[in-house]
């Protein structure tokens, strides 16, 4: 039997599938599209997602195809000084278009043994006490122990499951595409600079070889947002907004997106879970969408694997929703705020001017930047050291780097005392005795996603915390 069916072969689904395979879980990814999409929804990775790729040994592949850009200007496009000393070894944005991210994560999943079935839409879902049956459009039925819907904002899995998706529908819509322009680069740059002084949903960004990424406000909200706009529609809106259509022609693709903001009421119903856009949608302000989904997958993968492999402590799988639902709710709120600040109305523009002044203060700029790049997240593990519940950034060790030790997706005890032990849990927790000048703690216990679950130096205290995240000890591994 299949252990997990992942519905949706985008970045969230592929990273989740790969995380499960690290723990020998049998995974099948079911993707409705026969070929990978060429549409570029996302343009890059923020610091936390870059860290995730580093933690799994993938970062060199991404760096080879991407470009590093300075951090800043994320919040509603308001220019602000870059905060100094951000708590990450990767204080940059990695510019890499989504089709490349899709390709790299798919290759990673396939390398680990993930089975992918393309061109097979899901049309039915049936659950019982022990299994989930998925029906495909061609009549095929697949049975698995769990299903995870990573199938986007119009998620079939969420719909079949009957999970409510409360929030607000789109009020505005933006047209987007990649195409050639006949206007000169100088004219394009000058017009874009002038229009973007007041209209932030407009632009013509050169991609090389005469190709531009073009976006313009739509005239209202389409009844069927799944229907791609026409080139004539885009031309009309460019002229209406900028007085010129730049001579756009030969589009590679055209698409549209809105500012709808919704979040699934639940991320888990029995043996079916939701992740990525299937669990939450929001405007693209700040470039957080793909990153949020990848981070969902990173949180869920090891927990679902632990459940399947039989060592998960009670309630571990439920912490996926309790930890990630508030994170997404916060993203929805900050994108709502950003969209208001990009409104052309007098009130929002007054608030924008005030925010521009406030963001000159380092504390304000740091707070908003850490929110967007997701390094300020702290899960509630109770009171204690400020590091508890936060992910630990990559730090230098006497023998290499911390993230180099996390490629296998296991827990990790970084022990600077040399006196501690994870005996009984060594099948799921690595014990690294090493020293770092960058860590002011005798020892830290890291979950597979890099979040700090315990800090201390007392063996008995460690033994009390290991079962909370890694289940009962395997007595066969104790002396």
Image: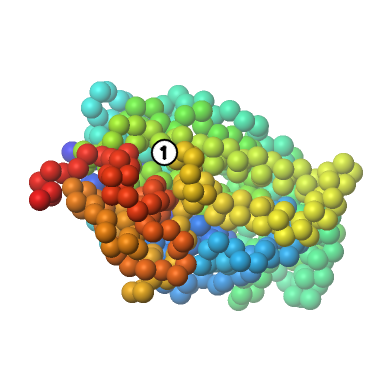
309 or 339, which is in the foreground? 309
Residue 360 placement (x, y as % from top left): 78, 60
335 or 225, which is in the foreground? 335
Instruction: Give the vertical position of 124 relative to 337 (above or below).
Output: above
Q: Residues within 10 Å of mark 1 (few under 14, many from 20)?
A: many
Would residue 254 be found to the left or right of residue 34 on screen? right
Residue designated by label 1: 320
Residue 410 visible in the picture? no
**Mark count:** 1
Residue 31 placement (x, y as % from top left): 38, 46
Would residue 471 be found to the left or right of residue 364 on screen? left
Residue 283 placement (x, y as % from top left): 64, 45
The part of the image, by quadrant, that contains residue 199 is: bottom right
Q: Residue at 39% x, 48% y: name it.
A: 454
Residue 188 placement (x, y as % from top left): 77, 70
Of all residues, the one furthest to the right in this rendering is 346
Judged from the image, the secondary structure of the residue bearing numbered disc 1 is helix
Residue 76 visible in the picture? yes
Would residue 299 be found to the left or right of residue 422 on screen? right
Q: Residue at 36% x, 74% y: name it.
A: 398
39 or 233, which is in the foreground? 39
Instruction: Give the vertical position of 154 relative to 284 (above or below).
Output: above
Q: Residue at 82% x, 70% y: name it.
A: 190
Q: Residue at 38% x, 33% y: name it.
A: 318
């Amino acid at each position: 039997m299949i252990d997990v069916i992942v519905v949706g072969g985008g970045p969230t689904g592929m990273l989740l599938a790969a995380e499960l395979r690290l723990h020998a879980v049998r995974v099948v990814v079911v993707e409705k599209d026969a070929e990978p999409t060429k549409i570029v929804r996302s343009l890059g990775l923020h610091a936390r997602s870059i860290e995730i790729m580093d933690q799994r040994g993938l970062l060199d592949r991404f760096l080879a195809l991407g470009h590093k850009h300075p951090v800043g200007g994320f919040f509603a496009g308001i220019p602000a000084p870059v905060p100094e000393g951000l708590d990450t070894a990767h204080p940059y944005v990695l510019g890499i278009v989504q089709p490349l991210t899709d390709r790299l994560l798919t290759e990673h999943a396939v390398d680990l043994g993930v089975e992918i079935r393309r061109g097979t839409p899901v049309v039915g879902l049936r659950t019982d006490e022990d299994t989930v049956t998925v029906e495909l459009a061609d009549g095929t039925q697949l049975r698995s122990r769990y299903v995870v819907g990573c199938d986007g904002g119009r998620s079939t899995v969420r719909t079949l499951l009957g999970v409510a998706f409360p929030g607000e529908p789109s009020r505005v819509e933006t047209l987007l595409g990649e195409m050639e322009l006949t206007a000169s680069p100088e004219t394009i740059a000058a017009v874009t600079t002038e229009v973007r002084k007041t209209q932030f949903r407009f632009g013509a960004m050169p991609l090389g070889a005469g190709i531009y990424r073009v976006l313009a406000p739509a005239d209202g909200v389409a009844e069927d947002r799944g229907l791609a706009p026409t080139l004539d529609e885009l031309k009309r809106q460019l002229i209406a907004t900028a007085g010129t259509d730049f001579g756009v022609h030969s589009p590679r693709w055209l698409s549209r997106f809105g500012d709808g903001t919704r979040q699934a009421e639940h991320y888990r119903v029995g043996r079916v879970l939701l992740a990525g856009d299937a669990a939450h949608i929001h405007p693209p302000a700040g470039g957080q969408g793909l990153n949020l989904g990848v981070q969902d997958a990173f949180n869920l993968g090891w927990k679902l694997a632990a459940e399947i492999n039989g060592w998960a402590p009670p309630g571990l799988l439920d912490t996926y929703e309790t930890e990630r639902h508030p994170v997404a709710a916060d993203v929805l709120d900050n994108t709502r705020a950003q969209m208001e600040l990009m409104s052309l109305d007098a009130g929002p523009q007054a608030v924008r001017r005030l925010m521009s002044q406030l963001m000159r203060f380092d504390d304000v700029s740091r707070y908003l930047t850490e929110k967007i790049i997701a390094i300020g997240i702290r899960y509630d593990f109770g009171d204690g050291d400020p590091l508890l519940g936060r992910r630990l950034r990559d730090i230098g060790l006497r023998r290499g780097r911390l993230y180099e030790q996390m490629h296998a997706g296991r827990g990790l005890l970084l022990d600077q005392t040399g006196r501690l032990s994870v005996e009984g849990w060594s099948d799921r927790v690595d014990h690294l005795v090493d020293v770092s000048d960058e860590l002011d703690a005798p020892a830290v216990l890291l979950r597979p996603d890099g979040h700090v679950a315990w800090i201390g130096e007392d063996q008995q205290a460690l033994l009390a915390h290991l079962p909370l995240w890694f289940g009962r000890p395997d007595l066969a591994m104790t002396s």
